[in-house]
Amino acid sequence: MATRYVKATGKDRDGDITKLCNSGETWSSRSKLDAIRDIENNIHDYRVKWTSSEDTTIRVVNGSSGKYLRTDLSCH
């Protein structure tokens, strides 16, 4: 499984993530649905690299309105 580092996200008007981005990378931008498929099928993992702590893995969460992407750390 290859790691992809995320530097930005696209969001809809409700603030929900719609895509993962890292300008300059061939995979960017990656839609939410494709990223979820990548994670669930162990094709790629997506991470946020922080300057003040360890990398944070983006994971798939099953919510009441469907699957979405989330990290466990919300601010740095």
Image (cartoon, rainbow, N blue to C red):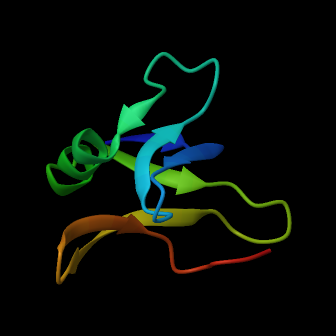
Using the rendered view, name the quadrant where residue 8 is placed. Answer: top right
Give coordinates of residue 14: x percent, y percent.
Answer: 45, 65
Residue at 52%, 80% in the rendered image = 72
Residue at 61%, 79% in the rendered image = 73
Residue furthest out toward the front = 13
Give coordinates of residue 10: x percent, y percent.
Answer: 52, 44
Is residue 46 rendered to the left or right of residue 64?
A: right
When the figure is inspected, residue 62 is found, relative to residue 20, above or below; the finding is below
Is residue 19 rendered to the left or right of residue 35?
A: right
Using the rendered view, name the quadrant where residue 50 is placed. Answer: bottom right
Quadrant (top left, top right, bottom left, bottom right) of the C terminus: bottom right
Give coordinates of residue 33: x percent, y percent.
Answer: 23, 45
Residue at 17%, 75% in the rendered image = 65
Residue at 64%, 78% in the rendered image = 74
Q: Depth check: 45 or 13 in front?
A: 13
The number of numbered discs placed on residues in the rendered structure image is: 0
Is residue 49 rendered to the left or right of residue 25?
A: right
When the figure is inspected, residue 76 is found, relative to residue 29, above or below; the finding is below
Quadrant (top left, top right, bottom left, bottom right) of the N terminus: top left
